[in-house]
Image (tube, grey):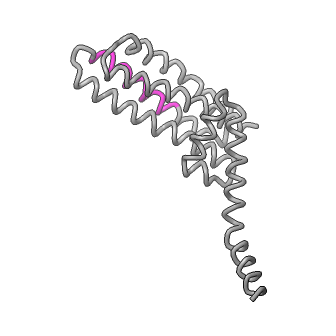
Amino acid sequence: MASSSYCFGLVSLAVLLPFLLISASATNYIDAICQRVTDKAFCAKTLNAYPAAASATSQFQAATATLSLAISYADKCAGFSGNAAKENPNLKTQFAASQDAFVTISKSVKSAASELKVSPDTANYDVMVCSDSIAVVKNSVGKNLDNASKTVMTMTLMMEKLLAIAVGATVAVGG
């Protein structure tokens, strides 16, 4: 009876060990990114909740997942801003500028993702220049009091945090 429990324990360990090792290594890759970010707790919580980052098997894969998350969010922000431009004729110009800024962010981070392996420094620059687009959004809708503007500003602040993590990812790959 004791030997069957022992065998079960060994088999369970053999089955679970690869998953535990992948999880532990992914945590190391996430930690390497988050060490380069001011809000480390937000970084760790965000990346550990994102399956592509949480299951990464290399630093490059974790960084690529991080950039993909930023691209996805920028695309969602652009879509929301575009819809807000259609629904708010009085603020169409401001929301269109916000939409353009988010499209620019998405393109810059896509460029960073494509350059990450060859030139992490160039990828880092591509992400860092997104702060200019963040400033465009803040200047366009930041002073408005309507609900759509407030939502765009909330999205912008989140985008800013995701871009900080993306910068950390490019630095982690660059070493």
Q: In this view, does 56 lie to the left or right of 100?
A: right
Residue 123: % across, % down: 62, 33
Question: Would you place residue 95 above or below residue 165 in this image?
Answer: above
Quadrant of the image occupied by residue 150: top left
Residue at horizontal 60 percent and vertical 25 percent from the top = 128
Residue lying furthest bottom in this view? 1
Q: Main secondary structure of the magenta part?
A: helix
Say which quadrant the C terminus sits in. top right
Residue at horizontal 39 percent and vertical 10 percent from the top = 143
Question: Would you place residue 50 above or below residue 164 in this image?
Answer: below
Residue 64: % across, % down: 59, 44
Let me know if residue 67 is in the magenta part. Answer: no
Residue 171: % across, % down: 70, 34
Viewer-proximal residue, 26 or 57?
A: 26
Q: In this view, does 139 lie to the left or right of 91?
A: right
Residue 69: % across, % down: 51, 41
Residue at horizontal 63 percent and vertical 49 percent from the top = 61
Say which quadrant the N terminus sits in. bottom right
Quadrant of the image occupied by residue 154: top left
Question: Would you place residue 111 above or below residue 56 in this image?
Answer: above
Quadrant of the image occupied by residue 6: bottom right
Could you tell me how many numbered marks the image carries? Answer: 0
**The magenta segment:** 92-108
Question: Would you place residue 87 above or below residue 175 in this image?
Answer: above
Residue lying furthest front in this view? 1
Viewer-proximal residue, 152 or 174?
A: 152
